[in-house]
Amino acid sequence: MSDEFKIEIVNPEKSFLSKEDVNEVVVPAFEGEMGILKDHISIISFLKPGIVTIQAKSGEEKYYVEDGIIEFKNNTLSILTSYILNLKDIEKNKLQELLKNAEEESNKPEISDQLKYLADQKVETLKSIN
Amino acid sequence: MASLDDLKKRITSVKSTQKITKAMKMVAAAKLKRAQDSAEKGRPYSEKMNNIILNLSSGISDKETAPKLLSGSGKEQIHLCVVMTSDRGLCGGFNANIIKKAKSYFTKLNKEGKELKIITVGSKGNDQLKRVYGNKIIDNISFKNSKNANYFDAEKVGKIIIEKFHKEEFDICTIFYNQFKNVITQIPQAQQIIPLNTKSDDQNNSEDNYEFEPDEDEILSNLLPKNISTQIFKAMLENSASEQGARMSAMDNATRNAGEMVDKLTIEYNRSRQAAITKELIEIISGAESL
């Protein structure tokens, strides 16, 4: 028996990725990292900035996301995100730029607690990629 | 009757107009392909988003505590209308159709005694609406500088709308845009985005039992602002495909009309040329006869 399920990542511009042979996905859910395997209960959650790791038959892939919503249902995982980058293709300058923006945001004085938390997460994740 | 010279000038001028419209048609056709592609690619996102929200809102038991973006402010007095048009003209009835739809809605609101506020997206709509509804327009957003519709622009508009909602500047928000059906048909749409209309199709989500993490309310309050940006982005994509489609068919018509006009003018030109020759001949012959 196979324990593979389907994943779909879409962003507003296009359908970003679609795979049928996924064994495990680890997503940075808002309340902590969450691993999803086949036959997981139907779930809806949203993401904080972090790394999505996809373990597939064809290999492991990592993506950086800034936000998103995930829905798991009938062994299909849908991830909706407005900003996603494949870690493999990410360029150093781009990374630096993102990091700088994120740091600026988290240092703003009038920012709300939730936004501050998200911005800090972003900084941390980006630093860890570096 | 115009002289031969005048006719000749008119023929050349019509011909050069035809050249321009033909070029515009081809440019529009190329852009249409791209706009259509991105409109189609953008659909899964907004559809999924909609599904998730429908699932979520059916899971909410207590409508009273639901986020305001979903349940509304409890009033229906102030209407905000976001009219989305293009920044450029020469696209047939594209802008006029949206404006017409919006205006009939405005009149309806007026009759019901509701208060009206307008945000225009795209400069053409602003130009047309400010004559009659100038004092109602509270904001005008234009993306002349961005080449294609992109999500960040949509997010900007979304943020403005949400901010105004939280300040309780309006109760109900409706967006107006053209839905792209095919090159010749674009359907002007009025879509209510605040409060969200969740009644549209509730047959497919009743038996799903979802686990929510964190709870429904928190997810919803995070998701709903995103949904507004997404809906606006969808409208922008549909609009840009419609705009190019409308421009293409308008320019196609213009090219054809110019062709017909050239034909007509050429016939007239030839006829008057021949008339002149005949006249000269008659003059020569009668001159010879009288001798």
Image: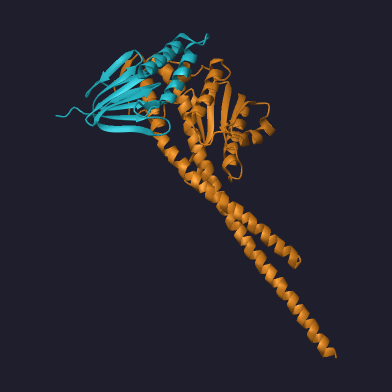
Chain colours: A cyan, B orange
Residue at 53 percent across and 48 percent down: it is B27
Q: Is residue B203 above or below residue A122?
A: below
Q: Is residue A33 left or right of residue A107?
A: left
Residue at 65 percent across and 26 percent down: it is B136
Quarter where residue B209 is shown:
top left
Q: Is residue B48 in view? A: yes
Q: Is residue A110 above or below residue A22?
A: above
Give A52 or A79, whichever is nearer the viewer.
A52
What is the quadrant of the N terminus of chain B in the image?
bottom right
What is the quadrant of the C terminus of chain B in the image?
bottom right
Q: Is residue B130 left or right of residue B91?
A: right
Tell me residue B178's x, y (percent): 52, 38
Tell me residue B64's x, y (percent): 44, 13
Q: Is residue A21 above or below residue A34?
A: below
Q: Is residue B112 in view? A: no
Residue at 34 percent across and 20 percent down: it is A51
Give B62 or B143, whichever is nearer the viewer.
B143
Give B55 or A82, whichever is nearer the viewer.
A82
Q: Is residue A129 above or below residue B93?
A: above
Tell me residue A81's x, y (percent): 39, 25
Name the residue furthest left.
A1
Tell me residue B169's x, y (percent): 58, 18
Name the residue furthest right.
B291
Q: Is residue A66 left or right of residue A20?
A: right
Q: How many marks?
A: 0
Residue at 61 percent across and 52 percent down: it is B20
Quarter where residue B127 is shown:
top right
